[in-house]
Structure formats: C-alpha cells, structure tokens
Amino acid sequence: MPSLVLQALARPENGRPPRFGFTVTKRVGSAVVRNRARRRLKEAVRLVAPELARPGFDYVVIGRHGALSHRFCDILDELRTALKKIHDERAPRPGRR
C-alpha cells in the first residue's frame, strides 16, 4: 500500500482484544512529519479496527510517505484492504512460521 505496510501475528492467548503498534522510519521525514503520519495512521486504525481487526492478533502499522500526502479516506481504504488481505492469506505458506 502507498501509505502503510501492515504486519500481523496471531498470539497464543486467543480471544484477547487486538493490539496495534505503530512505527514511521526516519526516511519519511523529521520528527514532526513522522508524528503527523503516526497520528493519521492511529486515527485510521481507531475507525477501521472495530470492524476488521480480529481478537488474538498483534498488528504493526508501518507508515510510509503516502500517509502524509494521501487523502484520509484513501488511507482508510488501504487499511481495510490490508486487514482483509492479511486475514484471507492466513493459510500457511512455505517459509512462513
């Protein structure tokens, strides 16, 4: 996705609420810019997670340059797509733990 990368890991204690972590690297910009991107991503997760995030999962949202320049509705759509894609592809693949 242009504005974010989403990673997920199933936790052994199933049934617990989903947890989210956020990171934006220095390549995106200064601290002010990174914090603005992180705030936009946190708000997107706050709006989208109740409908698509699954209990018992840890998620990491990695901010990219697009988190600053894309419209907020596009970020919401990208997050929805990423969550759906992660949970559709949960079947084990070679090289995946």
Image (cartoon, rainbow, N blue to C red):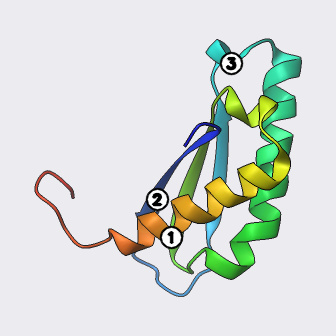
| Image quadrant in which you'd find residue 16 | bottom right
Q: Where is residue 87 in the image (x, y as percent from the top left)?
A: 43, 72
Identity, as a three-letter code, of the amino acid under mark 2: Ala
- What residue is disc 3 on? 28
First in sequence: mark 1 or mark 2? 2
**Which is closer to the viewer, label 1 or label 2?**
1
Left or right? Give the position of 7 relative to 51.
left
Crowding at mark 3 (Cα within 10 Å: few <14, some 14-19, many 20+) = some
Above or below 32: residue 42: below
- What residue is disc 2 on? 8
Identity, as a three-letter code, of the amino acid under mark 1: Lys
Q: What element carries label 2?
A: strand
| Image quadrant in which you'd find residue 62 | top right
Q: Where is residue 64 in the image (x, y as percent from the top left)?
A: 63, 30
- What residue is disc 1 on? 84
Q: What element carries label 1?
A: helix
Between 56 and 7, the one lying in front of the other is 7
Left or right? Give the position of 4 relative to 56.
right
Q: What element carries label 3?
A: helix
Q: In which quarter of the image is the C terminus?
A: bottom left
**Which is closer to the viewer, label 3 or label 1?**
1
Q: Can residue 10 be seen in this view?
A: no
- Rounded to the nearest whole Å, what is the CA distance between mark 1 and mark 2? 11 Å
Measuring 20% from the left and 55% from the top, which residue is drawn there? Answer: 96
Between 84 and 21, the one lying in front of the other is 84
